Image (tube, helix red, strand yellow):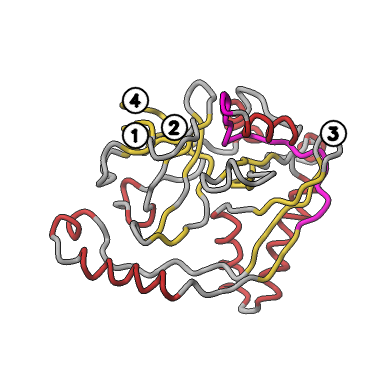
């Protein structure tokens, strides 16, 4: 595929990986408006000048990720992750107009049944989509374990020790860095589509996880941190934003789960009636 420009709109919360320490699922849009997934990327190990932001164009050397049957999945040809060139960042001017022109260039889904049918159709196999919920019914917070599996952590640490013996690894990656904190909560939206179908899908966006940690650091109280997350994702987003979801499947569950999609990002320009206030 060679050089490809991608407008980054999705960075999921880091997942630990025995092969790469941790991985961030990155997704976005090509210039023609089609969606693309870039995997694997150990984002926090990238050199500083290679690290990209959401809503930034980047240029990458890509090829189809042959280990993944999903058509939108690509990987970097350079396994040392050096051929990443961050380009222009697109701001929020004029109520995100330029961002909307890119993200909504090819329209969006509002029918879950249609989207899932396309995902299950082997001739289409849609695994990334922009989706507009018709109605948000609730924002759900559920407690989960705040500790990783000890065996997986042990495997990662052992692999680090082995890889640190090789200069090529030490020269091109940040060998030792703190393992990302595991989120102790699962955040989800319960919503309704244009045909009245209800669903509750987990939000895997890095943004919501980082918001929780930032609020916890700032206020020092867990209940206040959760309240602040709720104020943004429920009170503000539902009342004041023209809300869209970036939806994605996992390779493991794509053909197994009745509804294989997760919310991997949230797109939230202001509602038109909010613009009149400014």
Lateral position of residue 231 relative to residue 26, left or right: right
Nearer the N terminus, badge 2 or badge 4?
4
| Numbered range of the magenta stretch | 122-139
Q: Do the residues labelled 2 and 1 touch (CB within 8 Å)?
A: yes
Lateral position of residue 187 relative to residue 4, left or right: right
Q: Is residue 126 magenta?
A: yes
- Which quarter of the figure has residue 261? top right
Nearer the N terminus, badge 3 or badge 2?
2
**Closer to us: 69 or 90:** 69
Please name the residue that numbered disc 4 is placed on.
1
Residue 195 disc label? 3
**Quadrant housing the N terminus:** top left
Q: State the CA–CA distance, disc 1 to disc 3.
A: 39 Å
Nearer the N terminus, badge 4 or badge 1?
4
Q: Are marks 4 and 3 in contact (CB under 8 Å)?
A: no
Return the x and y of residue 106 as percentages of the image width and height.
61, 22
Lateral position of residue 5 relative to residue 71, left or right: left
Residue 60 disc label? 1
**Closer to us: 83 or 127:** 127
Please name the residue that numbered disc 2 is placed on.
6
Return the x and y of residue 88 as percentages of the image width and height.
42, 34
| Residue appearing at x 66%, y 41% in the figure | 245
Nearer the N terminus, badge 2 or badge 1?
2
């Amino acid at each position: 595929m060679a050089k490809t420009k991608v407008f980054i709109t999705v960075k999921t919360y880091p997942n630990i990986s025995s092969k790469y320490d941790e991985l961030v699922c990155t997704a976005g849009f090509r210039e023609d408006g089609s969606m693309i997934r870039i995997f694997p990327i150990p984002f926090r190990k990238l050199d500083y000048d290679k690290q990209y932001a959401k809503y930034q164009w980047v240029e990458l050397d890509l090829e189809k990720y042959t280990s993944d049957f999903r058509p939108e999945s690509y990987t970097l040809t350079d396994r040392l992750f050096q051929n990443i060139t961050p380009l222009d960042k697109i701001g929020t001017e004029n109520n995100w107009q330029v961002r909307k022109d890119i993200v909504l260039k090819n329209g969006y889904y509002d029918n879950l049944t249609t989207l899932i049918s396309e995902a299950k159709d082997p001739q289409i196999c849609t695994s990334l989509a922009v989706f507009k919920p018709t109605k948000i019914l609730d924002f759900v917070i559920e407690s989960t374990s705040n500790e990783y599996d000890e065996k997986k952590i042990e495997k990662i640490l052992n692999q680090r020790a082995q890889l640190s013996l090789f200069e090529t690894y030490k020269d091109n990656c940040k060998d030792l860095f703190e393992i990302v904190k595991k989120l102790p909560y699962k955040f989800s939206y319960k919503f309704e589509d244009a045909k009245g179908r209800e669903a509750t899908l987990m939000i895997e966006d890095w943004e919501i996880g980082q918001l929780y940690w930032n609020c916890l650091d700032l206020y020092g109280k867990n209940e206040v941190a959760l309240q602040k997350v709720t104020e943004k994702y429920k009170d503000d987003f539902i009342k004041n934003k023209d809300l869209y979801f970036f939806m994605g499947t996992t390779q493991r569950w794509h053909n197994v789960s009745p509804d294989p999609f997760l919310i991997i990002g949230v797109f939230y320009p202001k509602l038109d009636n909010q613009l009149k206030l400014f």
